Amino acid sequence: MPYIDYQTMYAIQIRIITVIIAAMKYYIWTSGCQMNVADSRRVASALERLGYDPTRQAENADVIVLNTCVVRQSAENRALGRLSSLRPLKKQRPDLVINLMGCLVGVKDNPKIRKAFPYVDVFSAPSDLKPLIQYLMHSRRPPISDIETKADRIIAESDLTMPKNGKNRSVSAYVSVIHGCSFACTYCIIPYRRGVERSRPICEIEAEVRALAGQGIHEVTLLGQIVDRYGNDIPDGPNLSDLLRAIHPIDGIKRIRFLTSHPHWMTNELIETVAELPKVCEYVEVPIQAGDDDVLKRMKRGYTVDEYVRLICDLREYIPGVSIATDIIVGFPGETEKQFQRTYNLLADLRLDVVHLARYSPRPGTLAYRRMDDDIHESEKMRRFRAIEALQTQISKDIHASYIGRKVEVLVKGKRHDRWKGRTRTNKLVFFETPEDRLGELVSVKINWAGAWSLRGTPFLGMSGEP
């Protein structure tokens, strides 16, 4: 019998699995943050390496993955509703595999949720593909030897590939660089559901970005619950500036972004790195959450309003034209009308580009849930929400109006109806019309219309050319 090396044997066995489950389909439902989007991309790639094809209809799938979020009660309710809706389908088709993944499961075993949903076949912690892949390999016949090793191999390879439902169409990708969070704000459930911080090695991230670039990805966004704490869990380890410098030279990558940052770890070194590296975009997400020092202290945010204001000034000084996004929570326990007004006034003064706005939602297990009364009525939370929403809508309109008549560089990411759409370096959404296929290109667009949420314009032949 001729000698067959390990690599060849692995390829043959994976091919056997693929043939066995040929024509089977998967469906993924994703809720929540960009981290979940990145995880779902990896799940899709791994399933396709097992021979599954994507479908847009859950009813047509042989494997259904629900990648869930519980950062607010509304997100948890959506996930539970979606999961409950699958029960009749599972009853009709017992062979259907249902995988519940993400923060609804958490990093610790959760007997309550297993008991509540006995029709779920696989429960997966955030970012953990292994339970699903091993389950699918175990359930197929004939049995495959050394399943754990082969599952690890498939999962590792999934980091390096775009799935079919994105390949040749997606030009941007999210890349997780640090998992979990070790900085527990009093309102936040994430550390309890995603675990402590675990930074990925630079070489591993670099290999992933290089592989994605080889498949047509032109823009990567580096992700972390607190991305600027990257490397903080490694003694004498690298930091986010080191990581940005490592991936910056990769051919094919035109733009680099990162999110979400924390004011305390947005260092001068990081600001200077963003200003220095041409591929790193002039866009920063740095949440303040509230504009009152007492509220920030109860939130355990670790900075004052004055420190945040100085940071915004530094960003604007060192990164000309920078676009800044923030997060705000209204109705945090004990927030008085005067404290809310300070938040409102701060946003009116800073005039940031984007405000991600949320009403406080008590999350069981958090310090705020255990020790603070949710004493702001929902109607008052909504009033405060609407007040800041109206303020920020006007600020966004004013900022966007300043773009009229200017030429901006747009990375084209797809079409909406008959218009191409893309993003500027400052993350502004731009629409334009042209009969040519411009997907994945950097196009110069002269802006002639501005709204609160998007811009429209006319493309130029080149960044300095004529129309």
Image: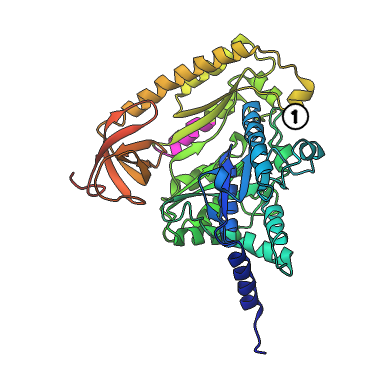
Residue 161 relative to residue 78: left or right: left
Residue 37 in view here:
no
Residue that sits furthest to the left in the current view: 466
**Residue 437 lies within the magenta run:** no
Residue 340 position, x and y percent, is: 58, 14
Residue pictured at 67% horizontal, 38% vertical: 87
Q: Main secondary structure of the magenta part?
A: helix
Instruction: Tell me which colouring the rendered structure shows.
Output: rainbow
Residue 444 relative to residue 260: left or right: left
Which residue is labeled 1 in the image? 366
Residue 344 in view here:
yes
- For the N terminus, give its image quadrant: bottom right
Crowding around mark 1 (Cα neighbors within 10 Å: few <14, some 14 to 19, many 20+) is: some
Q: Quadrant of residue 253?
A: bottom left
Residue pictured at 54% horizontal, 17% vertical: 385
Front-lying residue, 248 or 133: 133
